[in-house]
Image: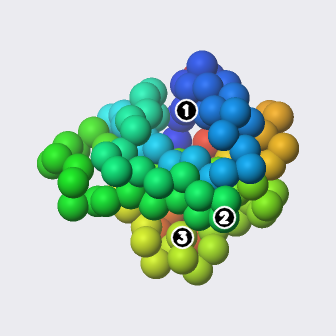
Amino acid sequence: MKLKVKNELMEGLLAYSRDIHPKEMILLLRGKVSDEIEVDEVIVPPSAVHGQSFSVFQPDMIPFDLSILGVVHSHPSGALKPSVYDLNHFYGKIMMIVAYPYQSVEDVAVFDGKGQKVPFTLS
């Protein structure tokens, strides 16, 4: 699986994570799939809750939209891997985690539904 993320989007995710810290943020990833997956936009999910060590949303409130590719959320703890809860509540094709201190692409990882790391490039 090849994955591209828009550079401006990545900068925005890092900034948003810093702004909402110490709470955990959650957003939906939007883009398109062809020979590769391209993430170019985020959406605030309906009824999203940002807590001190969690973030949740109501998947049943999201309208049918094939451009939603997955979820991005932050880990204020700095852990750059999905928790068991993350994997059990996987939504879409990919999950992106932005970890404290939210300074660069080195603080970001993407995973598939099995918890395997997915390499990505910036575009």
Q: Residue at x 17, y 47 (%)?
A: 63
Check the image and report above or below for 2 versus 31: below
Gap between marks 2 and 3, in whole Å? Answer: 12 Å
| Disc 1 element | strand
Image disc number at residue 86:
3
Image quarter of residue 5: top right
Gap between marks 1 and 2, in whole Å? Answer: 26 Å
Amino acid type at image mark 2:
Ser
Check the image and report above or below for 100 versus 51: above
Q: Nearer the viewer, mark 2 or mark 3?
A: 2
User: Answer yes or no: do the residues labelled 3 and 1 have beta carbons within 8 Å?
Assistant: no
Amino acid type at image mark 1:
Val
Image quarter of residue 66: top left
Which badge, 2 or 3, is on the more N-terminal residue?
A: 2
Image position, residue 101 (x, y; %) = 84, 44
* CA neighbours of label 1 inside 10 A, class few (<14), some (14 to 19), many (20+): some
Any part of residue 89 in sight:
yes
Image disc number at residue 53:
2
